[in-house]
Amino acid sequence: MKKIPVWIDTDTGVDDAVGILTALKLEPIEVVGVSAVAGNTYQNNAFRNARDVISLGGREDIRVYPGAERPLVKKLKVAPHVHGDNGLGEAEIPRSKAPIETTKAWDALYEKAKELKGELVVCPVGPLTNIAIAITLHPDIVDYIKVLNIMGGAAIGGNVTPCAEFNIFTDPHAAQTVLKSGIPVNMCGLDVTLKAFLDDDDIAEIISYGNKASDLFRDSNHMIYEARERVHESGLAEHDSCPIIFTAYPELFEGQKCGIYVETQGTITQGKTVTDLWSDYKFPDRHCTFILDVNQPEFAKLIKTAYKSY
Ligand code: RIB
Ligand code: CA
């Protein structure tokens, strides 16, 4: 069966690394490119981490491109309290030996999207800055990206403010550009990602594999784990694995078509993804789907199977 070509745009933090290492092992998809963006950590860390995680996954053939060092308008505010100063929870892994790409993310993504003639699925799992720049510099990219399967937003709730999720809050202007572009979107927001968790048994099982991927999982997750303890979450939410596993196995998820736009100006609501899911008023343009539920045991099993194979 023909594999789905996937491009991952990442602010290579701890859960991003889980998503990337899982992506490399999912049968239905083929990662054809990766790009780094500032978000969880500075772009230079995200770029280095993406290269090193791809290398740790044994795929130095996959090219990794540098991207935006700051949001379009807002100042960058990284998240060392969750992802550490280096972006990987202070875990150290070997440096990639792959050649260092200098082509910018937005140009490399455009070229790959054109090359694949509209078949490319893009999974942004960080702020949408690179995607927005690509749309602005190369407007016809909207004809070549099949769908954006995004980790971001929340129909209800937030994790940076009561109504905004980190990726969208970090660069709401980029998110608005992307959502107004007309490219079809499957939005994996907190509504589903907080249900897409690894429980304590799953975590223990992954660590028990004792391979290089599971050692990175063990060594990088302690800050997120402690944060989970503080907020009493039921498990370790693997936010960034959601759009990636959705791309490979959409049947494990449930969603609803809707319109989604972003509040960019609000003093309290900035970064909120405004959706017409539960509103009598429906946006005229409803080219998105909000993903709202997941088969968590099967989701966790796919991550465990991927990690066991390293
Ligand atoms: O809100 C969760 C998102 O913010 C994830 O992508 C995580 O990596 C951070 O970027
Ligand atoms: Ca991320």
Image (spheres, rainbow, N blue to C red):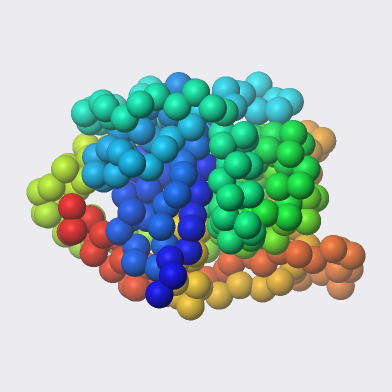
The one of 160 and 35 positioned closer to us in this rendering: 35
Spot occupied by residue 143 in the image (x, y as percentages of width and height): 73, 55
Q: Residue at x 23, y 55 (%)?
A: 307
Give percent across and percent down for residue 174. Answer: 71, 38
The answer to whether residue 128 is seen in the rendering is no
Q: In which quarter of the image is residue 249?
A: bottom left
Q: Does 79 appear above or below 228?
A: above
- Position of 188 with respect to 251 (left or right) is right
Which residue in the rendered view is the most extreme toward the bottom?
Answer: 251
241 or 146, which is in the foreground? 146
- Which residue is depicted at the point 71% across and 47% down? 141
Q: In this view, does 176 lie to the left or right of 67?
A: right
Locate residue 242 relative to residue 220 in the image: left or right: right
Residue 17 visible? yes
As displayed, is residue 162 above or below residue 101? below
Q: Could you say which quadrant of the image residue 198 lies in?
A: bottom left
The percent coordinates of residue 113 (x first, y second) are 60, 49
Residue 226's quadrant in the figure?
A: top left
Q: Position of residue 140 (x, y in %)?
A: 76, 47
Q: How many labels does the image show?
A: 0
Q: Is residue 284 above or below residue 307?
A: below
Q: In this view, does 9 lie to the left or right of 263?
A: left
Residue in the image at 45% along x and 21% along y: 44
- Residue at x 86%, y 72% (from the top left corner): 280
- The N terminus sits in image quarter: bottom left
